Image (cartoon, grey):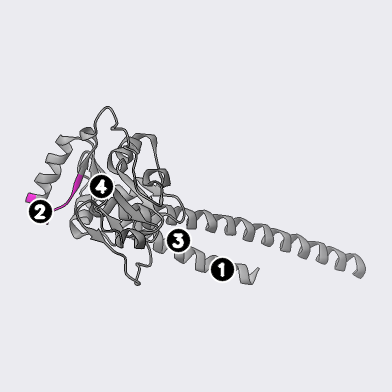
Amino acid sequence: VHQLREQLASARAQVELLEALWRRYEGFPDTVKALMSRAVDGLIGPLVDLVQARAGYEEVVEAALGPLADALVVRDRQALIRCREALDTHQLESCRFLVLSDIPATPVPMQPVMQEAVAGAVKQYVNAEAAYQPLVDWLLNDSWMIDDMHRLLNNGSVPQSRLVSRRGDRWDRRSWRLTGSRRAAHSRLGRKQRWEQAREAFQGMEQEHGRLVADAQQAEQAWQSLLAQQES
């Protein structure tokens, strides 16, 4: 029980840290933090809080999103105007926005890609609520994951599709983004899910701790009752 109590304290601290990082928008530009703190009507939140990558594919999805990983999602153009007014009023730096009402009513079908070693469409590794699935389709409808970026680098042809590798290398039809050996400790993508998972694990530990304490109390009561019987 004592060991589990120590584990509980450590898990509680981890949950509190992840929650604080999520609520303070740590790792985001100052403009994002400022706008999110002002509760602008129609401002939904960072794109990376609305989508979730399948486990093991976080770097693939974040690489495919590219600069859009910093974007804020707003409901419509009126919300965008209110955000622009906030930028001017509070003298904030520039920010990238995605407007839900800009999404085409009819999704553009994905074009087949004629590239060797393509493992599949990037969007198949993304989960999102139904309300934001059209946004995922719109942003990633031309992005594909490739097994071997090294082979592509050695190929003299210019790929016509957006391609990303499992380690996060990216070709966006204009430039290459290559991942170095140093990686960020945590991707911003999935930061809310990491907090929720840690909280769920902590709650499970709390329940286990409560069960062990109850069992210990019952055992102590039984022992005291046995002692009382022997003394009488």
Q: Are marks 2 and 4 in contact (CB under 8 Å)?
A: no
Which badge, 4 or 1, comes first in the chain's sequence? 1
Dominant SS type (magenta)? loop
Asked if the stretch drawn in magenta spans residue 35, the answer is no
State the residue position of label 3.
15
Which badge, 3 or 2, comes first in the chain's sequence? 3
When the figure is inspected, residue 223 is found, relative to residue 196, above or below; the finding is below
Asked if the stretch drawn in magenta spans residue 96, the answer is yes
The alpha-carbon separation of the residues under discs 4 and 1 comes to 52 Å
Q: Secondary structure at mark 3?
A: helix
When the figure is inspected, residue 44 is found, relative to residue 214, above or below; the finding is above
Question: For the magenta stretch, what is the residue range?
Answer: 88-97
Q: Residue at x 67, y 57 (%)?
A: 211
Identity of the amino acid at label 4? Answer: Gln
Q: Secondary structure at mark 2?
A: loop
Q: Residue at x 35, y 63 (%)?
A: 150
Which badge, 2 or 1, comes first in the chain's sequence? 1
State the residue position of label 2.
90
Q: Nearer the viewer, mark 4 or mark 1?
A: 4
Q: Are marks 2 and 1 in contact (CB under 8 Å)?
A: no
